[in-house]
Image (cartoon, coloured by chain):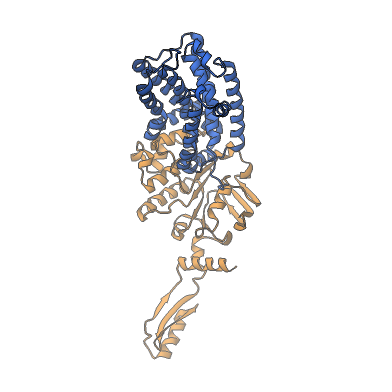
Chain colours: A orange, B blue
């Protein structure tokens, strides 16, 4: 669905995307994860055909986005990072209008149902909450039955409940077979939604793995910490049980303030970013 | 879905959104009507020189010409930057919508505003100030082609001008003085022939002067033509100037129009 090799984009002297490779296969949900300014939006907007690139081969649905036409656009769904347009129209009017641009659109009632906006269908878009507004953006993105859906930081600024509702919506689209590329700077979002995660930092790919493996990357190492001679000590070990046994022997029984922890997904991610910054 | 059906749908959507936007209603639809009520009440019964023509009759012609600027140039010069900054244009250009659909929608919306203004200007002008209607079918015909051609020029220049501002607020500050400048120099608020020569020369290079003069040709007596700068209403010359500006406007749009904000590509 998406095949990117050596994608590069500079803004003046600043290299926003630096030789990025990316593959998305059919039916997959790929999360492009990275901190603000990592190059996520630049990358996704090049794939969507909005931005030009300085170098690299890009194929989206078999077509170079830089030369794409309306037929190609009809196969894509795009949910932009932020939009406040269509304020004077209602949810239903907006969906019906965009449906007309496609040859085989979904029924408006179906789109309202999928996005959970049925109760809001006659509300002015300007009166929607942040979460409802993003679901409207998704509604307009999926009304044309896209083969590939782009979501650029879809839940930034959401409260936890709105995020849960939004995630259910994405799960539903996934279960219907829509291929999804989403950018996010929330690790738990990638973990909850994605089949595969590409971590980028400073425009470079620092990991391309599954959410589970991203967490396991360093989880063979376990951190053991304790108090000894009035200071905190810690040790990374792959054999924590043996280590604690010998430590207990050395300290004569009880180990003061003993803690054993596996690095979380969050720590694995932060470590990756650190490595990305250093390279 | 064929293109014509998309044009109709987009036009209806644009007009519906317009009618829900209080600011557009006030500034684009009712402003010329307010101005007629004020100017008509203050100066309406004064005669222009010894011509037998009342100022209100002269002013209505100028307001109809101004209406062409308000409904298209000013409306679009402000709305399009706003739609460029709030994501409207980005969403549309990312969809499979044929690009012409957007511009047809905008033109229809401007046409709607203008027809509304014209009906109210003539209706209220007739009832409140005794404005007389065009004397012949021929002059009604001139009224229609001047309106149509003027609206096309005004639309194209509004679309071209929209590239200058980064959002609606900046656009308002840029476009409003331009409209006012041409109204003062093109014989809308002031009698054109009483303006300084250099001012007349500048205004004669731009469309509003010719729209206003042609509108006077439609609504003022034939004898008043002797008071015009060229001694006649110069319909042919007006058509040529507006035709030239149509070409200039279309070229400006083709070469400068942006769907995305600056530096967003």
Residue B72 vertical placement versus A55 (above, below): above
Say left or right for B85 vs B255.
Answer: left
Q: Can the viewer see residue B243?
A: yes
Residue B54 falls left or right of residue A274: left
Q: Position of residue B81 (x, y in %)?
A: 49, 40
Quadrant in which residue B197 is drawn: top right
Which residue is at a point 61% across and 58% down the rendered structure image? A15
Q: Residue at x 44, y 28 (%)?
A: B12
Say above or below: A40 vs B42. Answer: below
Of the 4 image quadrants, the one containing the C terminus of chain A is: bottom right
Q: Write the residue at 50% across / 30% down.
A: B182
A227 vs B122, nearest the viewer = B122
Residue B106: percent from left, percent from top: 49, 30
- In screen coordinates, is A228 left or right of A72? left
**Pick the front one: B217 or A195:** B217
In the depicted view, which residue is nearer to us: A74 or A56? Answer: A56
In the rendering, at what x and y percent does residue A4 appear? 62, 52
**Residue B262 drawn at (x, y percent):** 55, 45
């Amino acid at each position: 669905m998406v095949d990117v090799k050596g994608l590069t984009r500079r803004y003046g002297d600043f290299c926003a995307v630096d030789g990025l490779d990316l593959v998305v296969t059919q039916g997959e949900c790929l999360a492009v994860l990275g901190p603000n300014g990592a190059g996520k939006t630049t990358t996704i907007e090049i794939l969507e055909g909005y931005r030009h690139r300085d170098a690299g081969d890009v194929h989206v649905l078999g077509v170079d986005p830089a030369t794409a036409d309306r037929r190609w656009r009809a196969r894509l769904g795009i949910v932009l990072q932020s939009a406040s347009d269509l304020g004077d129209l209602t949810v239903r009017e907006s969906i019906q209008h965009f449906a007309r641009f496609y040859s085989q659109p979904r029924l408006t009632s179906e789109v309202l149902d999928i996005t959970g906006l049925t109760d809001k269908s006659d509300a002015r878009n300007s009166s929607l909450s942040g979460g409802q507004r993003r679901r409207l953006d998704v509604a307009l993105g999926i009304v044309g039955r896209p083969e590939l859906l782009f979501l650029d930081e879809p839940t930034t600024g959401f409260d936890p409940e709105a995020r849960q509702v939004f995630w259910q919506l994405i799960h539903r689209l996934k279960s219907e077979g829509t291929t999804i590329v989403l950018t996010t700077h929330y690790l738990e979002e990638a973990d909850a939604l994605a089949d595969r995660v590409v971590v980028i930092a400073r425009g470079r790919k620092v990991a391309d793995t599954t959410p589970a493996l991203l967490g396991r990357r360093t989880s063979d190492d376990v951190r053991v910490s304790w108090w000894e001679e009035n200071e905190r000590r810690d040790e990374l070990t792959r054999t924590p049980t043996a280590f604690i046994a010998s430590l207990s022997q050395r300290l004569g029984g009880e180990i003061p303030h003993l803690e054993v922890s596996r690095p979380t997904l969050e720590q694995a991610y932060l470590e990756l970013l650190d490595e990305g910054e250093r390279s | 879905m064929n293109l014509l059906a998309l044009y109709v749908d987009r036009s209806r959507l644009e007009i519906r959104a317009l009618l829900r936007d209080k600011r557009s209603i006030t500034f684009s639809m009712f402003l010329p009507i307010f101005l007629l009520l004020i100017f008509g009440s203050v100066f309406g019964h004064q005669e222009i020189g010894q011509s037998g023509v009342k100022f209100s009759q002269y002013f209505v012609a100028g307001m109809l010409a101004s209406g062409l600027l308000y409904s298209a140039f000013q409306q679009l010069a402000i709305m399009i930057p706003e739609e460029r900054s709030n994501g409207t244009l980005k969403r549309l250009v990312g969809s499979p919508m044929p690009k012409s659909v957007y511009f047809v929608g905008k033109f229809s919306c401007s046409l709607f505003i203008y027809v509304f203004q014209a009906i109210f200007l003539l209706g209220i002008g007739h009832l409140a100030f005794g404005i007389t209607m065009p004397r012949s079918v021929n002059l009604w015909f001139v009224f229609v082609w001047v309106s149509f051609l003027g609206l096309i020029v005004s639309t194209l220049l509004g679309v071209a001008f929209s590239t200058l501002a980064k959002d609606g607020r900046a656009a308002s500050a840029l476009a409003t003085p331009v409209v006012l400048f041409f109204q003062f120099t093109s014989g809308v608020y002031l009698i054109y022939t009483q303006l300084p020569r250099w001012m007349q020369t500048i205004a004669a290079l731009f469309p509003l002067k010719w729209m206003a003069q042609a509108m006077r040709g439609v609504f003022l007596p034939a004898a008043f033509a002797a008071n015009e700068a060229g001694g006649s209403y110069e319909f042919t010359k007006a058509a040529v100037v507006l035709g030239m500006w149509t070409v200039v406007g279309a070229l400006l749009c083709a070469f400068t129009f942006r769907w995305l904000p600056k530096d967003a590509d």
